[in-house]
Image (spheres, rainbow, N blue to C red):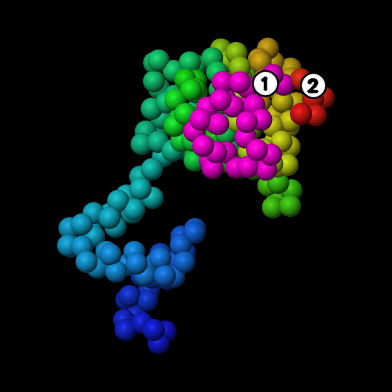
Amino acid sequence: MNGQYSSTLLEKAVNEFAKLPGVGRKTAMRFVLHLLRQDQPTVEAFGNAIVTLKREVKYCRVCHNISDTDICQICSHPQRDASTICVVENIRDVMAVEATQQYKGLYHVLGGVISPMDGIGPSDLQIESLVNRVKEGGIQEVILALSTTMEGDTTGFYICRKLEGYDVKLSFIARGISVGDELEYADEITLGRSIVNRTPYIKNNEM
């Protein structure tokens, strides 16, 4: 046991919280001590929520967003524009775009971006399922709302090449997002304007 801890149980709890992204050991200690001050039902509800999330959460079989059911609430919502798909890297990006309240279409979550340095290729992402959605018909526009990084641009252009043979409009979000920025960290106004003012994809466009 580390000498700074009076309890192995406390140390183990701190170690687990410290594994979370952006959480150092001091913050982890504050979390653990906060939980210790709560009553038993509150702590059990906290723990059960995490266990239940991992055990029961689903991924939408249409767009791959997190869902409680086989098809998420966005895909099944009758008032969403089913002719438009916004392609994003991850689930956090869906939340970011939804927060702008500027987009009323559907989504497609890739699960990452093409990154050879990290061993991530097109087959590791949900690109073929996107192509299949377009192939099934009814899609008029695909908006590529990917981070403005080299990996994001590479992924966007790869998708454009895969969809060039289909009668569908391809567009990128406007460059209101600074080059190199992750989508989830953009403020809602900037991201909203980038969605509204998206630009059409032009073959051989170097952006």
Mark identifier at residue 203:
2
Identify the residue at horizontal 72%, vertical 21% (top origin): 201
Type of the residue with mark 2: Lys
Identify the residue at horizontal 40%, vertical 36% (top origin): 67
Asked if residue 125 can be seen in this view, the reply is no
Image coordinates for residue 33, horizontal then vertical, percent? 29, 69
The span shown in magenta is: 173-201
Residue situated furthest bottom in the rendering = 3
Q: Quick one: 22 or 169, which is closer to the camera? A: 22
13, above or below 82, in the image: below
If the image is split into quadrants, where does the N terminus sit? bottom left
Badge 2 marks a residue whose secondary structure is loop
Mark identifier at residue 187:
none
Q: Quick one: 79 or 205, which is closer to the camera? A: 205
Identify the residue at horizontal 80%, vertical 29% (top origin): 206
Q: Does the stretch in magenta take in 104?
A: no
Image coordinates for residue 137, horizontal then vertical, percent? 59, 13
Type of the residue with mark 1: Thr
**184 relative to 10 in the view: left or right:** right
Query: Mark 2, mark 1: which one is toward the viewer?
Result: 1
Sort mark 2 into few (<14), some (14-19) or many (20+) by Cα contacts within 10 Å.
few
- Please tell me in which quadrant of the rendered image residue 69 appears: top left
Identify the residue at horizontal 56%, vertical 25% (top origin): 193
Q: Quick one: 144 or 26, which is closer to the camera? A: 26
Q: Does the stretch in magenta take in 179?
A: yes
Mark identifier at residue 199:
1
Q: Quick one: 58 or 203, which is closer to the camera? A: 203
106, above or below 93, in the image: above
36, above or below 204, in the image: below
Badge 1 marks a residue whose secondary structure is strand
CA–CA distance in space, label 2 to label 1: 13 Å
Image coordinates for residue 34, horizontal then vertical, percent? 28, 64
